[in-house]
């Protein structure tokens, strides 16, 4: 993990984000169809981009591959859970693909940055 002043808070924020995303993916379906046909896929990609970007900011570059693989496993696990739960949800390969696209976009953005965005925020908030 990166040496961050507020590491505990960043980790707790990530855990909360993780819990919210898992809940949103596994809660019973409302049964309502969206006005935008593929909104669900955009939501998957967006959620996994944010979660992956957050987690990648916590670790050094050498751990990026592990974080990426864990995020893909989380997405696959959610799809398996949706397939076995009788809550109006179904497992879809396209949802997993959307998750992977969000994860890979977060990885690409993280690789372009020189330092963690958490480190940047911490430098902005330190007294001069």
Image (cartoon, rainbow, N blue to C red):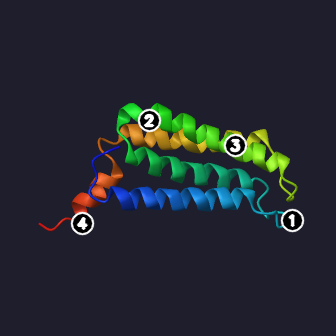
Mark 1 or mark 2: which is in front?
2
Distance from the alpha carbon under mark 4 to that under mark 2: 26 Å
User: What percent of the width, then of the height, locates residue 19?
Assistant: 59, 59
Give SS at disc 4: helix
Return the residue at label 3: 77
Q: Please, is residue 66 above or below residue 13 in the view? A: above
Distance from the alpha carbon under mark 3 to that under mark 1: 22 Å
Q: Please, is residue 124 above or below residue 60 in the view? A: below
Give SS at disc 2: helix
Mark 2 or mark 3: which is in front?
3
Distance from the alpha carbon under mark 2 to that under mark 3: 20 Å
Distance from the alpha carbon under mark 4 to that under mark 1: 44 Å
Return the residue at label 1: 31
Distance from the alpha carbon under mark 4 to that under mark 3: 37 Å
User: What percent of the width, then of the height, locates residue 72?
Assistant: 61, 38
In the image, 120: left or right of 100? left
Q: Earlier in the sequence, mark 1 or mark 2?
A: 1
The disc placed on residue 125 is 4
Q: Earlier in the sequence, mark 4 or mark 2?
A: 2
Give SS at disc 3: helix
The disc placed on residue 64 is 2
Mark 4 or mark 3: which is in front?
3
In the image, 64: left or right of 46? left
């Amino acid at each position: 993990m990166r040496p961050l002043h507020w590491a505990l808070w960043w980790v707790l924020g990530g855990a909360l984000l993780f819990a919210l995303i898992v809940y949103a993916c596994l809660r019973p379906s409302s049964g309502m169809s969206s006005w935008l046909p593929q909104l669900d896929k955009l939501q998957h990609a967006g959620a996994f981009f944010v979660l992956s970007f957050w987690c990648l900011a916590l670790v050094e570059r050498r751990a990026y591959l592990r974080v990426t693989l864990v995020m893909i496993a989380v997405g696959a696990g959610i799809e398996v859970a949706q397939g076995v739960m009788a809550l109006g949800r179904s497992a879809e390969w396209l949802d997993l693909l959307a998750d992977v696209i969000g994860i890979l976009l977060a990885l690409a953005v993280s690789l372009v940055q020189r330092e963690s965005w958490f480190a940047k925020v911490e430098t902005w908030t330190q007294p001069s």
